[in-house]
Image (tube, rainbow, N blue to C red):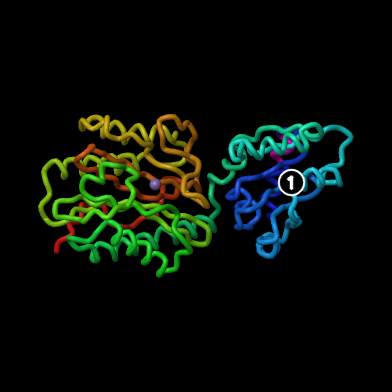
């Protein structure tokens, strides 16, 4: 925490703030170690507090010993924050400037903050200041991300020998989830996607009772949480040994888009340039209208973090960033393909944290 406290003090000094009010549960977790996702953090030059209710106070004291734990005892967060501000959390003879997470606060909560201490405090928008701190991972964080992704790889290895013709998408999804948890995952990083046949044309299809039949592409997008950190991977496989020329063409286009985009990845490269590389390959193959989403997203404590491989992200890759590379082509009413790896940016390139094969796997039964 000492390092992170210094970073926060620097932010306060740079932006002429007297305090920070941090409301995003992932940011609180990142800065303190407290993972309860119920609470509010108040940092001033003098003190560092986390406020929560009695369900979490014991956990908070264990996980975040460097912070003063404040039990709100039935009062609102705004009431207790106001109390702290009035009782020495800031010692100034002018209105304090307190940064708040405008991107991570409900309108209702903002309204309460304003009503309670709007006259005595200047609330200053922090935008994504704290989120951006999370983009570059420490070695310890990268180890947890790699471990989480390894559990996904093991589950994929298992699932390709488990899938049988006639199983439903739900059965396959359950087995993936069960396997990751049995291997040691603490939870899932998002709802597992198993989309077969026509359903695979929907990038985020909901898992259904659809029965998997021969000739179906099966897109599996899944991940787990290991010691707080998320994993994310996608593979598309074919049920049976008959695969159409069109399916092969689309699959190979997605694979080429991914492998060529990966070749660009290293520190200093603009995120939008990596996205553009994959997008151009897909457009050149005639499928430009069928790749609507961004090429990838940062991964950490939360499944979708900064930076993004998207046409509008002008951030530059830095060593320590963990990000997915996941091009796809989705032909409505027909089928879709997505291939996704999760990578960590190194000093001169990247390390692929996903080790599952990417050539088209035929589930032969
Ligand atoms: Mn993803």
Residue 207 x %, y %: 32, 52
- Nearer-the-camera pick, 135 or 36: 36
Q: Which residues are magenta?
A: 10-14
Q: Is 108 in front, or is 261?
A: 108
Q: What residue is rendered at 17% in x and 57% in y?
A: 362
Q: Which residue is mark 1?
A: 43
Q: On screen, 343 above or below 158? A: above
- The percent position of residue 363, horizontal first and vertical second, equals 18, 59
Left-right relation of 353 to 126: left
Q: Quadrant of the C terminus?
A: bottom left
Q: Is residue 301 above or below residue 172?
A: above
Label 1 SS? strand
Quadrant location of residue 70? Answer: bottom right
In the shown orientation, is residue 143 left or right of residue 257? Answer: right
Q: Main secondary structure of the magenta part?
A: helix
Question: x and y percent of residue 303 in the render?
Answer: 47, 49
Q: Residue furthest right?
A: 93
Point 48% across, 61% down: residue: 226
Please count the marks in the image.
1
Q: Is residue 90 part of the magenta span, yes or no?
A: no
Q: Farthest residue in the bottom direction?
A: 182
Q: Is residue 290 left or right of residue 138?
A: left
Q: Is mark 1 within 8 Å of ligand 1?
A: no
What residue is drawn where x is 29% and y is 31%? 280
Quadrant position of the N terminus in the picture: bottom right
Residue 78 locus on image (x, y percent): 74, 43
**Neighbour class for label 1 at 10 Å: few (<14), some, many (≥20)?**
many
């Amino acid at each position: 925490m000492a390092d992170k406290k210094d970073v926060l003090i620097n932010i306060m000094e740079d932006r002429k703030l007297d305090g920070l009010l941090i409301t995003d549960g992932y940011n609180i977790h990142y800065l303190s170690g407290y993972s309860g996702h119920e609470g509010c953090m108040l940092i001033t030059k003098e003190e560092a507090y986390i406020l929560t209710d009695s369900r979490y106070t014991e956990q908070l004291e264990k996980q975040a010993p460097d912070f003063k734990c404040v039990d709100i005892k039935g009062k609102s967060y705004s009431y207790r924050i106001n109390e702290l501000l009035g009782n020495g959390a800031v010692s100034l003879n002018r209105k304090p400037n307190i940064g708040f997470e405008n991107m991570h606060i409900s309108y209702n909560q903002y309204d309460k903050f304003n009503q309670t201490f709007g006259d005595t405090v200047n609330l200053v928008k922090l935008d994504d200041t704290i989120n951006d701190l999370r983009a570059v991972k420490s070695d310890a964080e990268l180890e947890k991300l790699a471990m989480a992704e390894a559990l996904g790889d093991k589950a994929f290895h298992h699932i390709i020998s488990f899938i049988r013709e006639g199983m439903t998408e739900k059965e396959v999804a359950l087995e993936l989830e069960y396997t990751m948890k049995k291997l040691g995952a603490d939870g899932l990083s998002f709802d597992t996607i198993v989309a077969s046949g026509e359903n695979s044309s929907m990038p985020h299809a909901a898992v259904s009772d659809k029965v998997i039949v021969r000739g179906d592409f099966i897109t599996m997008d899944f991940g787990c949480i290991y010691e707080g950190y998320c994993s994310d991977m996608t593979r598309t496989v074919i049920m049976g040994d008959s695969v159409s020329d069109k399916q092969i063409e689309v699959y190979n286009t997605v694979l080429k888009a991914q492998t060529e985009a990966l070749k660009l990845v290293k520190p200093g490269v603009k995120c939008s340039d990596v996205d553009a590389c994959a997008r151009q390959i897909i457009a050149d193959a005639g499928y430009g209208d069928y790749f609507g989403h961004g090429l990838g997203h940062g991964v950490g404590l939360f499944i979708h973090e900064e930076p993004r491989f998207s046409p509008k992200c002008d951030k530059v890759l830095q060593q320590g960033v963990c990000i997915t590379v996941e091009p796809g082509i989705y032909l409505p009413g027909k089928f879709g393909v997505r291939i996704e790896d999760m990578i960590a940016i190194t000093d001169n390139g990247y390390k692929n944290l996903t080790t599952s094969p990417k050539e088209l796997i035929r589930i032969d039964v």
